[in-house]
Image (cartoon, rainbow, N blue to C red):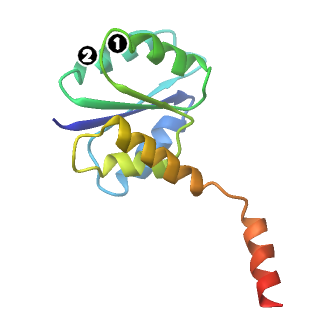
Amino acid sequence: MKNHIIIASHGGLAKGMADTAGLFGVQNVTAIEQTVQETGFESQVQRVLEQYKDENVVVFTDILGGSVNQIFFKYLRQQPFHLVTGMNLAVILECIFAVEPITDEFLRNAISLSREQLCYMNDILNTAQEDDD
């Protein structure tokens, strides 16, 4: 079964993430965005989930508790797909380049690894300077 990645956000974040992923030549990504002017976001969600219903879908949303995530969350009972919120580029790329079908275990591991990449670089600089002394 083929993996398909859906990136969804408020504003232009999803498109930006998808554009960045495109620099790596990927084609299994769909971006959808909820904007102030957008009144049909939920129908977009329904359409995109229907379009990829025969694939292994992983949806990334921007904010836990945000309207984008809430809309996808309510569809989890109706259709099987993976939903990850608090997205970042590291975990998205990990999923984009997965060769095998993405599983729950794969996602838990990718999320754990991506957390390790979130760091305050000033502390790393200070630690490196202390080691040099």
Question: Which residue is depicted at the point 38% across and 51% down?
Answer: 94
Question: Which residue is depicted at the point 48% across and 52% down?
Answer: 90
Viewer-proximal residue among 8 and 116: 116
On the rendered image, what quadrant is the N terminus found in? Answer: top left
User: What's the amino acid at mark 2?
Assistant: Glu
- The answer to whether mark 2 and mark 1 are in CB contact below 8 A is yes
Could you tell me residue 95's position as x and y percent? 35, 46
Crowding near the residue tagged with mark 1, few <14, some 14–19, many ≥20 C-alpha atoms within 10 Å: few
Viewer-proximal residue among 51 and 87: 87
Q: Is residue 95 above or below residue 121?
A: above
Q: Residue furthest bottom?
A: 133
Q: Is residue 76 above or below residue 21?
A: above
Choose top left, top right, bottom left or bottom right for residue 25.
Answer: bottom left
Question: Which residue is depicted at the point 53% across and 20% down?
Answer: 68
Q: Which residue is mark 1?
A: 46
Q: Helix, strand or loop at disc 1? A: helix
User: What's the amino acid at mark 1?
Assistant: Gln
Crowding near the residue tagged with mark 2, few <14, some 14–19, many ≥20 C-alpha atoms within 10 Å: few
Q: Which residue is mark 2?
A: 50
Residue 103 horizontal side relative to residue 69, left or right: left
